[in-house]
Image (spheres, helix red, strand yellow):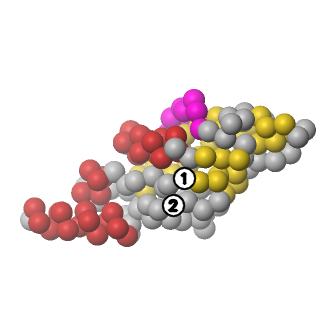
Amino acid sequence: MHHRRNFLALVALSTAACSSIASDPDFVWANREMTERTFPACQPRTNSHPRLVTGKAPIYPISRVMAEEDGHAILEFDVTERGRAENFKMIESSKRIFYTHTRIAVSDWIFEPAIQDDVPITVRCKFRQDFIIK
């Protein structure tokens, strides 16, 4: 039984950590380098939305893989005029560990900042991360 759980965890980590951005349900990844994306649901509205330049997808929490549990996290954060994510706030999370893993990943992301009147500005963005074992 113990070996079966370890095997399931390894399989799940390598194939099942699927996620989506709420504004784009077709955007999925499995714990790998994320592709360039814009974040249009940020406030205040700007001439140019923040754009993800580089970053890794959140890692599926191993304890939730072992429990075969899906989950999600919704968080807000600032994308600064320097292109970094700061000032995190949990909006909703099915388990705190899903929020924690999402926050850890997002805190390392690098953005091209939002532009208003040809000047980079800080904006407040919302992001949803779904964790689904298939």
Q: Which residues are magenta?
A: 85-93
**Left or right of 9: which side holds 15?**
right
Residue most extreme to the right: 117
**Residue named by callout 1:** 55
Tell me whether circle 2 and circle 1 mark residues in contact (CB < 8 Å): yes
Q: Sequence-wise, which precedes: disc 2 or disc 1?
A: 2
Quarter of the image where the N terminus is located: bottom left
**Where residue 81 sits: x, y (%)?**
72, 35
**Residue named by callout 2:** 33
Give the residue drawn at x 84%, y 37%: 119
**Left or right of 22: which side holds 1?**
left
Residue most extreme to the front: 82
Quarter of the image where the C terminus is located: bottom left
What amino acid type should be assigned to the residue bearing mark 1?
Answer: Gly
Q: Label 2: state its secondary structure.
A: loop
Would residue 124 be seen by someone viewing this image from the given angle?
no
**Where residue 38 sits: x, y (%)?**
70, 54
Q: Label 1: state its secondary structure.
A: loop
